[in-house]
Image: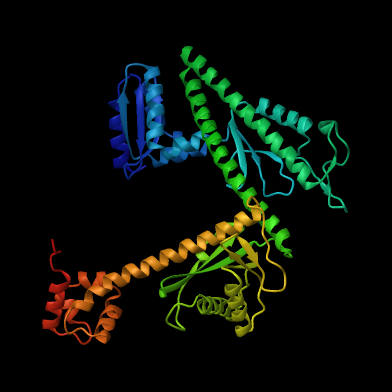
Amino acid sequence: MPADRSLNLKEKVRALPDKPGVYLMKDRLGRIIYVGKAKSLKKRVSSYFQRGRARTIAQPKIRALIDTIHDLDTIEVKSEPEALLLEGRLIKQWKPRYNTDFTDDKRFLLVRVDFAQELPRFMLTRIRKDPRSRYFGPFAHSGLLRKTLAQMRRQYGVLLSDGTPQLLPDGRWQLYDDVRQDIYGHDNVVTTADYRLRVEEACAFLDGKTREWLETLRTEMATAAEKLNFEKAAELRDVIAALEGTLKRTRRFERDRTLLRSDVDGLVTLQQALNLPVPPTHMECFDISHISGTFVVASMVHFTEGRPDKDHYRRFRIKSFIGNDDYRAMEEVVGRRYRRLAEEKKPLPDLVVIDGGRGQIAAALKAFIAIGVEPPALIGLAKKHETIIFPDERPPLNLSINHSGLNLLQRLRDEAHRFANTYNADLRSRKMRESVLDDFPHLGPKRKAALLEHFGSIDKLRAASVEIIAAAPGIGPKFAADLHAYLNRPAET
């Protein structure tokens, strides 16, 4: 610890009162890194700075805290219970780094269930690090927790961390080498789907236990406070806060899993309805947007595993013609998209969806033929009756309005429609801003185009000074001054 910092802290510690309060440890940037409470501020805070304490203390996190302390503040209160309440409020307000670390300290266990595994197991851990897994806890009573997991194995026939399941030739799983008493009453050989149902039931049981234990901890905390055992009460308060946070994350996790299950179900049912070789994990949809043949644009949106994947969205301005022809527009943008993927040797999507009927899908197929690319699965979705159109001799297909596959296609189509309309509106808005130049005398189409190309937009041109405008190619000082005055004239009332 630098001499000047050490001297400053020692002076502050010597001046502390022998009274209850809360202390706030700060780092060299003045950030609060730890909040603590004390029956005696003088005794408690001075214990951090006793000679050799940082070297001899057992817990690495506390050693790191002591090494980081650069300054401190204190708040004196009337009683130890008041200090306990104030400490909790300040921790919630400031969320200090080391309080968070201590709340997740290795004294407390979590239960982790990794749903990415084919056969999820219930495992004990002390660190929450995988956002794809579901966690229960932390739990202050490790003995009770281990007994509960053993009970779950018997009651629901699930695997704990010591399980070594074997895959059988018929695709089912043998959970244990022999039929243990641990899963008495349950089949030892199961399918993946049947086992996951067991996991869902066990999770619901453990979730209920967690809420039951939360109430028990609250009672224990109140009892400890009544007995003036404030260290125990503070410890239990931290565990309760962490457990409440877990329950909130669990609700969010379950909501996300419900959405994911819906998406997966939509992909599988769509595969079956369209007779696809695999679920359409990657889908792309095209839509054309225009206003009476003007501002003709197209959009392409990409869904990955049933969810929007906006990094792969694309939008197109029609280049090959001027006018109102949805079929030619569709042929152009589909050709541009998949010619580029072919040239870059990138994979095609599993399914291409065209917003429209027979004419639009024929135009898309024509584009694939023109660029010499074998099309992936290709369908049209006609709006009137949400009819699926095929590019071959298959008859149109109408799915139930509640069909999860059709609902997925509708979300894909609606997103393409939204994206195309947004682009169209952006272009119209930009065109309206640019049209202000049409009324400026002696500014022909070529010079107008050159100005917009030079400045990028009418907004940037309006914000430019006379000198900057005059520096543009083909623009003189007088013309620049007149244009600047024209663009920045007061609005008419």
314 vs 366: above or below: above
Q: Is residue 236 visible?
A: yes
454 vs 87: above or below: below
- Quadrant of the image containing the N terminus: top left
Give the percent coordinates (x, y) of residue 153. 76, 33
Q: Quadrant of residue 465?
A: bottom left
Q: Looking at this view, is 405 or 250 the one in front?
A: 405
Lateral position of residue 356 relative to residue 421, left or right: right
Residue at 67%, 35% (x, y): give it: 203
Number of marks in the rendered image: 0
- Quadrant of the image containing the C terminus: bottom left
Give the percent coordinates (x, y) of residue 130. 59, 47
Q: Is residue 49 visible?
A: no
Give the percent coordinates (x, y) of residue 358. 61, 72
Lateral position of residue 161 relative to residue 95, left or right: right
113 vs 325: above or below: above
